[in-house]
Amino acid sequence: MTELIEQPPLTLAAEARAALGKRNLVLIGLMGAGKSAIGRMSAQALGIPFVDSDHEIERVSRMSIPDLFATYGEAEFRALETRVIKRLLRSGPRVVSTGGGAYINENTRRHIKRGGLTVWLKADLDVLWERVSKRDTRPLLKTENPRQTLENLMNARYPIYAEAEVTVISRDVRKETMVDEVLAAIAATRKI
Ligand SMILES: Nc1ncnc2c1ncn2[C@@H]1O[C@H](COP(=O)(O)OP(=O)(O)OP(=O)(O)O)[C@@H](O)[C@H]1O
Ligand SMILES: O=C(O)C1=C[C@@H](O)[C@@H](O)[C@H](O)C1
Ligand SMILES: [Mg+2]
């Protein structure tokens, strides 16, 4: 007689991990969307390494991002960002949190699309502004009207971020809630 052994249900993290397989999880979105914070916590839940492209760029260049922009300009920064992200994607699975402009660069976007499952953390202007206005370290927001600049970036970038496989609305809820929503969205990609 064969005995039917019931399997316990998989946890959300285990379901998401299974759906991810060997792919990287790549977080994209505007400054302040929570890519670094939610990315780190998601990696912990999934039991895979976490890397942040902005931090990695600062590590390899031994310069801060504002200094890189000031010394070499945005075009050079983007070229370095492409190279760093291409390398970070090489050994998955990992969670790779990207800088806000990474996915907007055509070259970088091509590598990201090849290298992982992309999740867009989409937030509205008030949420982003509330978060980014606390620190003035973002070179692109050093303008006369940084809130308007942020809105302009939203208008220009949101149609491109929308190419991500998965979108999760980033808002003022507990970070743990955001992580659960990211994991649920990843798990759901296997059920479609
Ligand atoms: N759900 C949340 N609730 C409250 N605060 C949050 C939430 N998610 C992120 N934050 C906070 O908002 C700030 C910006 O988040 P974070 O640095 O992760 O954004 P980011 O998308 O990585 O931005 P950047 O592109 O500038 O690196 C941080 O102080 C972070 O702790
Ligand atoms: O939105 C952007 O273009 C940027 C976001 C940050 O993460 C940094 O990568 C840099 O400040 C540029
Ligand atoms: Mg970040």
Image (spheres, rainbow, N blue to C red):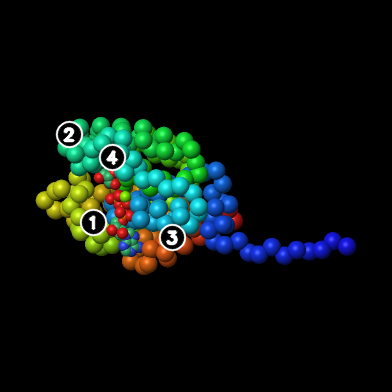
* Precedes in sequence: disc 4 or disc 1: 4
For label 4, being within 8 Å of ligand 2 is answered no
Residue type at tag 2: Thr
* Precedes in sequence: disc 4 or disc 2: 4
Residue, disc 3: 179
- The answer for how far apart the CA atoms under marks 4 and 3 are is 26 Å
Q: Is residue 152 left or right of residue 56?
A: left
Give residue 58's mark: 4
Q: Is residue 131 above or below residue 149?
A: below
Give residue 71's mark: 2
Q: Is residue 59 left or right of residue 177?
A: left
* Precedes in sequence: disc 3 or disc 1: 1
- The answer for how far apart the CA atoms under marks 2 and 1 are is 23 Å
Residue type at tag 4: Glu
Q: Label 1 neighbourhood size at 10 Å, few (<14), some (14-19), many (20+)?
A: some
Give residue 13's mark: none
For the point 55% across and 43% down, which residue is it?
22
- The answer for how far apart the CA atoms under marks 4 and 2 are is 13 Å
* Precedes in sequence: disc 3 or disc 2: 2
* Precedes in sequence: disc 2 or disc 1: 2
Q: Secondary structure at mark 1?
A: helix
Q: Secondary structure at mark 4?
A: helix
Q: Is residue 80 above or below residue 138?
A: above
Q: Position of residue 90 (x, y in %)?
A: 47, 36
Q: How many marks?
A: 4
**Residue 86 showing in the rendered view:** yes
Q: Label 3 neighbourhood size at 10 Å, few (<14), some (14-19), many (20+)?
A: many
C-beta proximity under 8 Å, tags 4 and 1: no
C-beta proximity under 8 Å, tags 3 and 1: no
Residue, disc 1: 132
For the point 24% across and 41% down, which residue is it?
65
- The answer for how far apart the CA atoms under marks 4 and 1 are is 19 Å
